[in-house]
Image: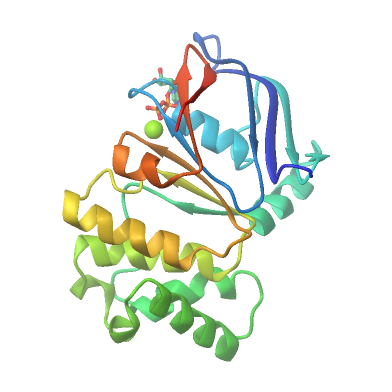
Amino acid sequence: MNAAVALEGVWHRYGSGPWVLEGLDLEVGAGEAVAVMGPSGSGKTTLLSIAGLLTEPTRGRVRLGGVPVPRSQRRRDRLRAEWFAWVFQTVNVLGHRTAEDNTALSLLARGVPRGEATRQARAALGAVGLADRAGSPVVDLSGGELQRVCIARAVAAAPKVVLADEPTGQLDHATSLRVLDALWAARRPDTALLVATHDPQVAERCDRILRLVDGRLIEEPT
Ligand SMILES: Nc1ncnc2c1ncn2[C@@H]1O[C@H](COP(=O)(O)OP(=O)(O)O)[C@@H](O)[C@H]1O
Ligand SMILES: [Mg+2]
């Protein structure tokens, strides 16, 4: 079967700087959870942003569902919106709006009508254990709850791939566990997850662990 997302022979550098990625290959299957580990500066965020079509690689190719991503900016924009949702290390929410409104945003952006978006947002908040906080302004939520809202927002729109960049990087141990439970509970079985992390707790839950070394990925025994 075709991988959900594949990087083939990807090289990347910023301007005339040193090479960050050097002939990197990666395949993430539908429904598969893959962790990318590596020290700060090793290129994890660069890798995710190339996979998610935010950055065009200097050389090499990205395929989605086996199909090469076209060069046309308009078509890349459409694929990016259709395929990917992000969870970042730092939460980004509209502070004066409720958890439900923030979660519904990803659905409204896809043209889902308001009533249906609200229903699906509530379901996603339920899946991350925040059903009772749906109507709370997000300023009233804790850091871990906020990250769960971000997870609900990411999965609500049923992306084919969730890209998570150090999603527990700002959280303590106990809170991280709750956030990971939420991510695993809310993710649909066919949604791929590519997660950059330093956190062994995150990596342990993934189907595969890859280490980013010298611009390429090395598979770790699990
Ligand atoms: N926008 C950018 N412009 C120039 N250099 C960058 C940019 N983004 C990242 N880099 C450099 O690329 C390398 C990899 O960075 P990054 O992908 O953020 O690694 P990681 O996420 O593993 O910390 C680092 O040396 C970083 O300084
Ligand atoms: Mg990074």
Quick check: can you spot residue 121?
yes
Residue 80 shown left or right of residue 100 in the figure: right
Residue drawn at x 53%, y 71% as measured from the top left: 156
Residue 47, by quadrant, is top right
Residue drawn at x 31%, y 37% as measured from the top left: 200
Residue 56 shown left or right of residue 180 in the figure: right
Quick check: can you spot residue 92?
no
The picture places residue 131, in percent across and down from the top left corner, at 34, 83
Task: Relative to 35, say whether 218 is above or below.
Answer: above
Residue drawn at x 29%, y 69% as measured from the top left: 95
Q: Nearer the viewer, residue 109 or 193?
A: 193
Q: Nearer the viewer, residue 79 or 33?
A: 33
Quadrant of the rendered image holding ligand 1:
top left
The picture places residue 176, in percent across and down from the top left corner, at 25, 53
Residue drawn at x 61%, y 53% as measured from the top left: 31
The picture places residue 143, in percent across and down from the top left corner, at 21, 60
Task: Relative to 44, say whether 173 is above or below.
Answer: below
The quadrant of the picture occupied by the C terminus is top left
Task: Relative to 213, say whether 149 is above or below.
Answer: below
